[in-house]
Amino acid sequence: MSLRATFTACGYTADGVLGRIGESGQAGLGRNVTVPASRALAGDSDELATLIRLFILQQEVPSEDAAFLGASPFLTHEQGRARAVVDVRPYGSDDDGATGWLVSDLTPGLDHATTPTRADYVLGASPASTTLAQLVIRREVGAALDLGTGCGVQSLHLARHARRVVATDINERALTLAQASAELSDARVEFRLGSLFEPVAGEQFDLIISNPPYVMSPPTRDGDTLSYRETNFAGDGLLQAILRDAPRHLAPGGSLQLLTNWAIVEGMDWAERLRPWLADTGCDAWVIERERMDKFSYIELWLADAGLAGTPQWRPAYEQWLDYFEELGIVEVGMGWILLTKAGRAEAHIRIESWPHAVQQPVGEVFARHRAAVDAALLSDEELWASRPELVNVRQETMGVPGAEDPEYIVFRQTTGLLRGMRADTVVAAVLGALDGELTVGQVCSAVAQLLGREPASVARQVLPEIRGALEEQYLIIR
């Protein structure tokens, strides 16, 4: 029996593990604590309990309890005890149905043990992995590239909607474990070793995704670099390199999606610093800053991630990072999402914004519709006047003084995606509210103008800019 068949027969799935260790056990693992899950197993030694102990809780078990796994390359045996050498964890996504098992290195720092991280460490599925998976455009494509695949989690998602998936990584160990993930999960993926786009020279893809090693740490010897999270690019030079090289690997209409960091440099507006990098691509670009950290919090986060907290190396490393950031002028670090689309426009459309507010995941469909939304927003006045937009997934809220005859203003609030809110006066609200995909903008504006005793041209001048904004931000769509 194959290992995949054994896991399935034992119920070693995402739902099976959750059902066995419970919500408290799962929450504990999210904090890198195994005690709640261990208590839930209560000394059980059946096959599912054994798999959880070995691969998730990193516990030794009697070799006889693990005999059903055979001569597994994922285990080592010594003095009648079996121990996992890697983490093999069930994976399941409710969003797109991607399921299987991910093979990665054992979680360091479990139960607050201080464990230095090996340079070629391979990270398993993380919150960042989940976020990127929920951002990705999930429409059918011919070829997709998973740039810097790590344990291969994104390739499991891509394999569900791409006819061909190529995954690359500079870390040979990562490719070995990612290939094991794909084989266990029955996902067809081509794996290639190399840095950035070197392994796919001359090739183009309909979709490229990456959660690159964006941590801006001081340069180190290559053997000391934690390849899953950092490089020896200066500051956010890796991001600049990806944006520079990606367009030649995008097929016409293709998109690049990144979950990444960028430097906030003293004395410079962050958006204007990134804008030339984006303009040089010739592609449409949409950057959304989701979070920002001051340099001290950022450094402390990644020193702890490297296993240096509580060690003599922590303070010298902290000082080294601060000196490095001061040298580069970095005062904060922005974190967020980037979409680059080879739209083929004479003048690329670039949008850069901060949106730290709650969103309704997954938001992949918002990114999938972005090109069409920009197309609609850029229609000529004549084309827009003749178009038939439809207000979708929006709730209308009326704001004003209680008891007043008329509202002060109206807010259209999205119920999906980015959950934006659009403030409108009564004229704009009347027009937007009547756009149902059947009537043209011209028909609605003329009807509203007649009700108000105004000229249609006057109403048009007032509402067309608002309609353009509503189209770009996807309150309105043209089917």
Image (spheres, grey):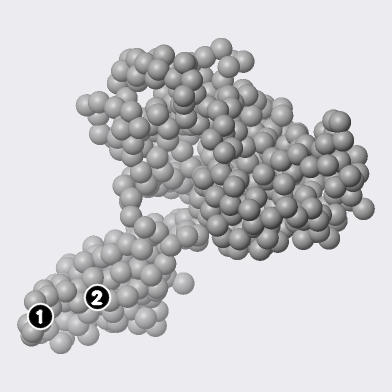
**Quadrant of residue 116 within the rendered picture:** top right
Q: Earlier in the sequence, mark 1 or mark 2?
A: 2
To which residue does mark 1 refer? Answer: 402
**Quadrant of residue 437 within the rendered picture:** bottom left
Q: Is residue 403 left or right of residue 309?
A: left
Question: Relative to residue 165, is residue 477 depicted above or below?
Answer: below
Q: Residues within 10 Å of mark 2 (few under 14, many from 20)?
A: few
The reply to whether residue 48 is in sight is yes
Q: Position of residue 433 (x, y in %)?
A: 28, 79
Q: Position of residue 110 (x, y in %)?
A: 59, 37
Q: Residue furthest front?
A: 43
Separation (CA) of disc 1 from disc 2: 14 Å
Q: Of the residues shown, which amino acid type is indicated by label 2?
A: Glu
Q: Nearer the viewer, residue 19 or 230?
A: 19
Q: Position of residue 100 (x, y in %)?
A: 72, 54
To which residue does mark 2 refer? Answer: 397
Q: Of the residues shown, which amino acid type is indicated by label 1?
A: Pro
Q: Residues within 10 Å of mark 1 (few under 14, many from 20)?
A: few
Instruction: Give the SS element for disc 2.
Output: strand
